[in-house]
Structure formats: structure tokens, C-alpha cells
């Protein structure tokens, strides 16, 4: 169900929405698990219906194809994600994009085009419909390639060796209290990044957004009366080292062993049994190649 044409769209645009094999009954159980987890605040690995979702082989097979890899494992488990209803007056689209657009992953184009791909496979599993007005994520198609090409040009070899890493960056102006300041993503061409027109990523219940968050994207206000319901999961090719800030790395190292203990024995391999692939990459020390020009 993840076709070569869809893979090509992901590589060109940085995002593609695909169908999943989940039945209506399975989706009902998954959504009920989402509702319970949001209501009770329990750990996801304690819910058996959540476990049935995360250990479904489809996510692993999509990640293998996406990452050009014979073997993959979870980078992060399946977390319930909500975009709650916003209250009017609503912000206009230009302001939302200018204040919210960012990247999560820093990688070079060589990382993206490697085999296996040195990139995080990010899969957003939608548990209800995602029309435009229900907080559909906005993306700027193709921006991932321009930005990764920029990192390929400007980063020192010792810094390229520390990629891919989760390292949130945004175009100027960057608030001085932002973790990355004074690092930023320079404009490439006209108009500036913040003045371009993103597209909403709409989807039907049960579909999966395959996202490359090395490109510009943004959360969006939900103007509907019901929340947008998602489960987010990410994967990496076995043997590819990845960087996370300390607090996120600590959380992954605490979460994954507990998740692994709940999986069926034949599915336990999707959680790594060690963390030699996960290095600490914080916002200090700064990399001067990423500073604002001043």
C-alpha cells in the first residue's frame, strides 16, 4: 500500500499521505485507546489496544521502504497527539505560518539520499478525519531539499558527522529566548520562507502522513468543535546513529524498554535492546555556521 509513486512524492515534496490496512473495528479500538489515554493520562504502553497498534507490521514495512533499509527499529513509540479546538477570534493564516514554521530534524542532503537513509521516518496515524479546518498541519512542499542542501554546503565536516539530529530551527526573526538562538534557517530565493504559502495536509481517518520534518512545517489552529486525533511514531534504520537533546534522549531510554516488555515476542525486535545508536545532542555548544548573519 506504500507505492513507488508515493515514495517519489515523499522524496520530492517531503510529505505524502498513504492508506493503511486497519479495519473500521481496529480504528474504533485505536480511537478508544486514544480517548482513554488523553482522559486518564496513563502511560501508552499500559493500554492493550495501543500496543496492538504499535506492533502492527505495517508501520515497520513502511519505514523499511522509506529508509531503504533491511531492518529498522523505533526511534520513538506511538504517542497520542491532540490538536484541541481553538477559541475565536482565530489568527489569520499568514500570522500562523510566520510564527509557527520550523524544522525538527537537521540533516544534509547526503544523509537523505544515503542507503540506508540517514533520516527519521515519521508516521502520523490519523484516528479521525483531518479536514483543513480541523488543525490540519501545514507544510511547505520541497523545502526539505533546499534546507538540507544548505546544510550540505555550510556545515563543517565534524558537524556533518553529528547528523541526523533533532534540532529545532526556524527562519528569522528568531526569538532571543528560543533554544536555538541565534541559529536559524536562511531564506533561499524569494519570497522569504515566512511569506510563502504552505499547504494543509488533509487526510481521512485511518490514513498515515509520512513526513520529513527536515522541511518547514507548522502546527495549525483547530477551528472545529472536535479535536484532531493522531498517534505519532518514528523509526530509524538499524545501525544509523541519531542525536537527541538530553531530556528527549532520557525519555526515549526510559520509555522504550517498558514498551518492549509489552510486545508479543515476535514483534519485540521493533524496539532496540540497547541505546548505542542514540547520542546526546544539545543546543550547546552552538555551531557558528548556523548563526544569524549579524
Image: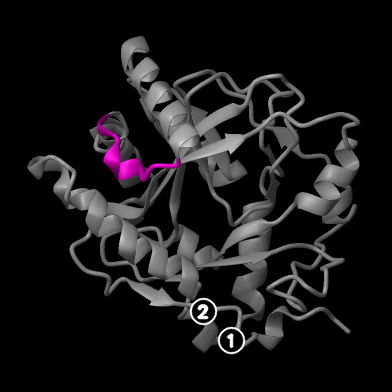
Pick out the residue farthest to the top.
24
For image coordinates 73% across by 34% down, the residue present is 199
* Circle 1 residues within 10 Å: few <14, some 14–19, many ≥20: few
- Return the residue at label 2: 160
**Element under disc 1:** loop
Q: Which residues are magenta?
A: 41-48
- The foreground one among 277 and 260 is 260
Toward which corner of the image does residue 90 lie, by quadrant? top right
State the colouring used for the structure image.
Answer: one colour
Q: Is label 1 in contact with label 2 (beta carbons under 8 Å)?
A: yes
Residue 141, by quadrant, is: top right
Left/right placement of residue 78 relative to residue 284 reads: left
Residue that mark 1 sits on = 156
- Residue 209 picture location, percent across and down: 51, 34
Query: Can you say which quadrant of the picture contains the C terminus?
Result: bottom right
Left or right of residue 237, residue 162 in this image:
right
Residue farthest toward the front in the current orientation of the protein? 40
Amino acid at each position: 500500500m506504500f507505492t513507488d509513486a508515493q515514495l517519489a512524492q515523499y522524496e520530492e515534496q517531503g510529505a505524502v499521505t498513504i492508506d493503511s490496512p486497519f479495519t473500521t473495528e481496529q480504528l474504533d479500538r485505536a480511537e478508544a485507546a486514544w480517548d482513554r489515554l488523553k482522559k486518564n493520562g496513563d502511560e501508552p504502553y499500559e493500554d492493550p489496544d495501543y500496543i496492538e497498534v504499535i506492533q502492527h507490521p505495517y508501520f515497520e514495512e513502511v519505514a523499511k521502504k522509506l529508509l531503504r533499509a533491511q531492518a529498522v527499529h523505533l526511534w520513538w513509540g506511538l504517542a497520542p497527539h491532540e490538536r484541541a479546538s481553538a477559541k475565536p477570534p482565530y489568527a489569520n493564516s499568514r500570522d500562523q505560518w510566520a510564527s509557527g514554521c520550523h524544522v525538527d530534524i537537521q540533516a544534509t542532503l547526503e544523509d537523505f539520499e544515503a542507503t540506508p537513509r540517514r533520516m527519521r521516518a515519521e508516521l502520523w496515524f490519523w484516528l479521525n478525519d483531518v479536514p483543513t479546518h480541523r488543525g490540519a498541519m501545514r507544510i511547505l512542499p520541497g523545502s526539505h531539499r533546499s534546507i538540507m542542501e544548505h546544510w550540505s554546503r555550510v556545515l563543517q565536516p565534524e558537524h556533518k558527522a553529528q547528523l541526523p539530529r533533532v534540532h529545532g530551527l526556524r527562519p528569522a526573526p528568531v526569538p532571543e529566548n528560543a533554544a536555538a538562538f541565534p541559529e536559524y534557517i536562511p531564506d533561499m530565493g524569494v519570497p522569504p520562507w515566512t511569506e510563502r504559502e504552505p499547504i494543509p495536509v488533509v487526510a481521512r481517518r485511518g490514513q498515515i502522513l509520512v513526513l520529513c520534518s527536515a522541511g518547514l512545517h507548522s502546527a495549525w489552529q483547530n477551528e472545529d468543535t472536535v479535536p484532531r486525533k493522531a498517534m505519532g511514531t518514528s523509526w530509524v534504520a538499524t545501525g544509523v546513529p541519531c542525536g537527541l537533546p538530553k531530556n528527549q534522549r532520557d525519555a526515549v531510554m526510559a520509555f522504550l524498554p517498558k514498551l518492549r516488555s509489552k510486545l508479543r515476542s515476535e514483534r519485540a525486535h521493533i524496539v532496540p535492546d540497547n541505546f548505542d545508536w542514540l547520542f546526546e545532542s544539545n543546543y550547546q555548544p552552538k555551531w557558528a555556521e548556523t548563526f544569524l548573519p549579524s
